[in-house]
Amino acid sequence: MLPLHFHSKLTILMAVTQFYRKTRKNYATANNATTVMKQLMLRPTIKKVDVEAIKAEFAAKKA
């Protein structure tokens, strides 16, 4: 059986490794979300919309 002080050091080292892994995962999640947002913003906006034709279409449906 290992001495008591060795157990505590081993536990601390393992916990630090988990923190590093969790930190990497958190950074990756944030970077992936940022990338998705940037890709969505790259899509062009619809600029040429005939508003009057749409209004006339709705008016025709009401009548």
Image (cartoon, rainbow, N blue to C red):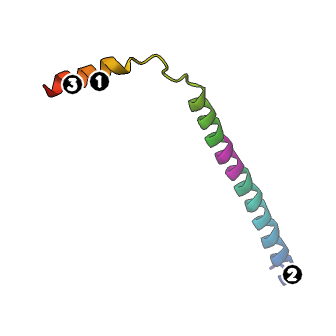
In contact (CB < 8 Å): disc 2 and disc 1:
no
Query: Is disc 2 placed on a helix, strand or loop?
Result: helix
Mark 2 to mark 1 CA distance (whole Å): 79 Å
User: What segment is highlighted magenta in the picture?
Assistant: 25-31
Looking at the rendered structure, which numbered label has been put on residue 5? 2
In contact (CB < 8 Å): disc 1 and disc 3:
yes
- State the image quarter where residue 8 is shown: bottom right
Query: Is disc 1 placed on a helix, strand or loop?
Result: helix
- In the displayed orientation, state which residue is furthest to the left: 63
Find disc 3 in the rendering and name its residue: 59
Amino acid type of the residue tagged 3 in the rendering: Ala
Nearer to me, 42 or 15: 42
Nearer to us of marks 3 and 2 is: 3
Looking at the rendered structure, which numbered label has been put on residue 55? 1
Question: What quarter of the picture does the C terminus occupy?
Answer: top left
Question: What quarter of the picture does the N terminus occupy?
Answer: bottom right
